[in-house]
Image (spheres, rainbow, N blue to C red):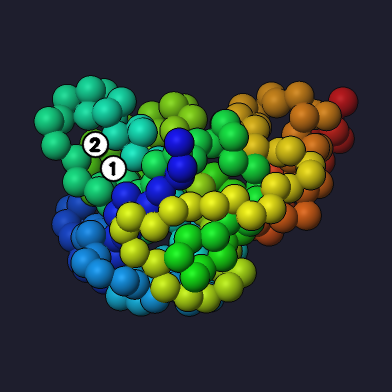
Amino acid sequence: MTARLRAVNAGRARVVAWQGKRVETSIYKSTMPGPVAVRTLGLDGDEQSDRVAHGGVQKAVYGYPSEHYDWWRAALNRDELPWGAFGENLSTAGLLETDLRIGDRLRIGTVELIVTQPRTPCYKLGIRLGDDDLPARFRASGLCGFYFAVAQEGIIAAGDAIEIVARDPLEVTVADVMAVFVDPLADSERERRVVEHPRLATRLRDRLWERLASRTERT
């Protein structure tokens, strides 16, 4: 089956009430009709509220497999979840974390993207779906989606084919990275293979390096 783009989603920042506080978030995404421009820092019409944790060159675009939606509908006891419910820009079909590798290069429309890391969500995912425990459940599930850097700007639209134009030779999958991230006692050799990948997003790599170094010092 040819991988395809099922929906393109974007959203502006808004302020919401959460635990007695006012929180700014851009996790509320709506499906965009027609072609959408993708630039180095993301989609036209999209924003990131916390630019330390979200966005930037290495996390410019977030993709999430549409295949996971049925699982989450059952897990969350919801009949409906609209595309973009997990804050993704791209709702995809035919791409999974267990196959997609860090460093893979994809073409969608006239855009080329490079896979940089899995999603490791913060509390705002819980705000979006009304479940404060959801971020931890999301991480544990392994159904994390994938962030992209934009290698070539261009135009995309729902229905576009997704082509993997170059496979990374190091064969570190998005699922491999997420498995190491969620396991503080991960095998050191497996963790080193992940953190030494030159295409892994810098902030996540530094975090994993610190954990690996700390554990090495104690042994």
Q: Which mark, by number, is residue 52?
A: none
Picture residue at 21% right of the left edge, 67% below the top = 33
Question: Callout 2, which amino acid?
Answer: Asp
Q: Quadrant of residue 202?
A: bottom right
Q: How far apart are marks 1 and 2 (CA)?
A: 5 Å
Marks 1,2: beta carbons within 8 A: yes
Q: Which mark, by number, is residue 126?
A: 1
Q: What element carries label 2?
A: loop
Picture residue at 65% right of the left edge, 51% below the top = 104
Q: In which quarter of the image is residue 208?
A: top right
Residue furthest to the left: 79
Give 21 or 109, whichever is nearer the viewer: 109
Residue 80, image x, y percentages: 14, 37
The numbered mark, 1 or 2, whose residue comes first in the sequence reads: 1
Horizontal arrangement in the rendering, residue 88 relative to residue 108 (left or right): left
Q: What element carries label 1?
A: helix
